[in-house]
Amino acid sequence: MIHLREALATDAEAIRDIFVACYGADYPYPQFRDVALLTKLIYSDDTLLLVAEDSETGRVLGTASVILEVGAFSDLVGEFGRLAVHPDARQRGVGKLLMHERLARVRERLHVGLTEARIVHPFTLKIAEAHDFRVVGFLPQRMLLSRRESLMPMVRYFGGALELRKNHPRIVPEAYPLSHLSLENCGLMPDAIVDEESPAYPAAEGFDIEDLTTEGYAALLRIERGRTRHREIFGPLRLHYGFFKLAARRSRYLIARDAGRVVGAIGFMLDANEKLVEIFELISVDDQAIHCLLGELERRAREEWGIEYIDVEVSAYAPRMQRTLLEIGFLPAAYIPALAFHEVERLDVLKMVRLLAPLDLGPLTLSPAAQAMADVVLRQFTQRSILPRIALAVGELSLFGGLSEEQTRRLASVCTVSEFAPGQTLFREATAGGELLVIMSGEVEVRVNGETVGKVTRGECLGELSLLTATPHHVTAVARTGVEAALLTRAELVQLVRQRPDIGVLIYRNLAVDVGQKLLRSDATRTQREFPG
């Protein structure tokens, strides 16, 4: 028989032993492997810590916690974290019992429950899904154990949380597929509005950036924007917690000065053990210092502190901030509806990630819902390594002719890159088409009925007619040399043109020119064959 109860101080050693057995002695969260810190956690009013005990032997078999009020604005958000069952006690339903008990004890105290499921094994994800937690993102390589592990953020709502949700968030196009899937997973109508027009905050220069000291603290407190009005960044701390309390939470601020005057600051938590930075607040008297503060933090994290992962939770109603983060290298990784409470509404939050370590996911064990979400998120992280390769070839790619730098980046973001060995067939005539290949390097031989009719080289396209008309390919394409090509599918093109007709006009013009040039070459080849000399 399993007995569930709140943890006592005398349970601290047993809880520590469970985490060491599950994760090893190098578990990065000291409060779960240090008896003194565990005892403090047990007595904390902000944490519910449960244990599962064998009624016959008195042995503690598992533990689980809920960290209450993880938001800095009394948002009624709780984090369901650190569910661990001793390896000796698995397959006895202990994890399910702990999850059920946690929900029963906090459902009247929360609006939103969050959890981040480890996915190197299926236990946490399965338990969370069985208790109505919904998948809302994928955090690649978020946690550092023996290697960087990915996590699956999940959410469950209580009471009237969703009734208070603010409708029609405004998001950048890069976040739309993620938001659409997340809202559907949560049983909500996808109502996000794609914002293509809002620019990033200006990349102004000339600010002096320094660490916050007690000298600048009072001046910073007087700056209102970014703290309680028009919040654009969310997190578990706020400046008014006090300088020394912030320092005790491993929190720091970089401040921006203009001619000696404090004009802004960015607050963040730095974990050197996990090589992690979490941004939780951005304060500025106007728009000028925002880009500079974000960019300088990213630079220091990358070049000076050896950080491998930075994340930030940004308002889904703040497209300028989203666009600014994209420019600095952050990508959308999670979309949590109704997460933050502001005035009389609950706001959707977009979690954006700057992954500084090489993308190396390792083994994943995912449910169908989790796999669909991972596919949506990882597409952009994979493209992050592709975009520079496309950018190097843009000057010679006919498809990109006449596009501005922003338009080029937008078109490149929906392409993928494929490589073909010499002699490999790219596609065959009379087979299903619906995709376009833009040759970035190498040479392709074009055949009709087995006869070579031409070749395509760097900067040219293949499959235009199939892409435009959704008909089977009219030719067979075979790599004459090693070939690298950018691939654009019809579905991606249709969606892009719907969102950006200005790009669509230029793409269709470029495709028409490309088809015309090929027809002229083909006619010339046929004429020479029929009338040699």
Image: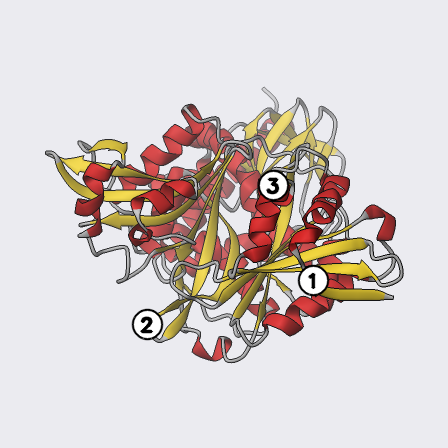
Distance between mark 1 and mark 2 Cα atoms: 30 Å
Distance between mark 1 and mark 3 Cα atoms: 18 Å
On the rendered structure, is 462 left or right of 217? right
- For disc 2, the neighbor class at 10 Å (few under 14, some 14 to 19, many from 20) is few
Q: Quadrant of residue 316?
A: bottom left
Q: Residue furthest left?
A: 259
Q: Is residue 472 visible?
A: no
For residue 128, which numbered disc appears in the image? Answer: 1
Give the image location of residue 246, x and y in percent.
37, 45
Circle 2: element type: loop
Instruction: Name the N-terminal-most of marks 1 and 2.
Output: 1
Give the image location of residue 435, x and y in percent.
61, 48
Instruction: Please say if the residues under marks 3 and 2 sit with CB atoms less than 8 Å apart.
Output: no
Give the image location of residue 113, x and y in percent.
57, 65
For residue 65, which numbered disc appears in the image? Answer: none
- For disc 3, the neighbor class at 10 Å (few under 14, some 14 to 19, many from 20) is some
For residue 143, which numbered disc appears in the image? Answer: 3
- For disc 1, the neighbor class at 10 Å (few under 14, some 14 to 19, many from 20) is many
Q: Residue at x 79, y 66 (%)?
A: 3
Q: Nearer the viewer, residue 419 or 249?
A: 249
Q: Nearer the viewer, residue 531 or 420?
A: 420
Amino acid at dot 3: Met
Q: Residue at x 30, y 50 (%)?
A: 239
Q: Is residue 313 visible?
A: yes
Amino acid at dot 2: Glu
Q: Nearer the viewer, residue 255 or 473?
A: 255
Instruction: Name the N-terminal-most of marks 3 and 2.
Output: 3
Give the image location of residue 322, x and y in percent.
38, 51
On the rendered structure, is 406 left or right of 393? left
Q: Residue at x 53, y 54 (%)?
A: 334
Q: Which residue is mark 2?
A: 343
On the rendered structure, is 230 left or right of 80? left
